[in-house]
Image: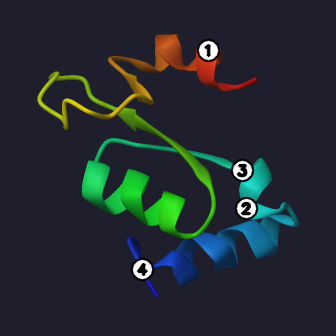
Amino acid sequence: MAKPRPAAFLAACERLGVPPAATLHVGDEHAVDVLGARAAGLRAVHVDRTGTGPADEVARVGSLRELAAHLA
């Protein structure tokens, strides 16, 4: 199984022993990483270094330096 299938994210959570709702997935491909993770019940942040991602995405960072705000 592979992203963006929810089963891929759920399998990773199971292997790590963490519930999906307590997991934050960070990725640079919005459709694959962010939407796939959310479909599996994970929180997700889009790393949008170029600023060309979906305008309505509220969980977006321009670099990993900005990620700390999403870790709470």
The image quadrant of residue 2 is bottom left
The residue that label 1 is drawn on is 69
Residue that protrudes farthest toward the bottom in the picture: 1
Spatial CA distance of label 4 from label 2 is 16 Å
Residue 44 rendering spot, x and y as whole percentages: 52, 45
The residue that label 4 is drawn on is 2
> Which label number is shown at residue 23?
3
The residue that label 2 is drawn on is 20
- Label 3: few (<14), some or many (≥20) within 10 Å? some
The amino acid at mark 3 is: Thr
The tally of labels here is: 4
Closer to us: 32 or 35: 35
Kindly check if marks 3 and 2 are in contact, taking CB atoms under 8 A apart as contact: yes
Spatial CA distance of label 1 from label 4 is 28 Å
Q: Which of the two marks, 1 or 4, is nearer to us in this view?
A: 1
The amino acid at mark 1 is: Ala
Left-right relation of 49 to 62? left
- Label 4: few (<14), some or many (≥20) within 10 Å? few
Q: Which of the two discs, 3 and 1, labels the residue nearer the N terminus? A: 3
Q: Secondary structure at mark 1?
A: helix
Residue 40 rendering spot, x and y as whole percentages: 57, 70
* Rendered position, 5 above or below 41: below
Residue that protrudes farthest toward the right in the picture: 17
Q: Which of the two marks, 4 or 3, is nearer to us in this view?
A: 3
Q: Which of the two discs, 4 and 2, labels the residue nearer the N terminus? A: 4
Spatial CA distance of label 4 from label 3 is 18 Å
The amino acid at mark 4 is: Ala
Residue 23 rendering spot, x and y as whole percentages: 71, 50
Q: Which of the two discs, 1 and 4, labels the residue nearer the N terminus? A: 4
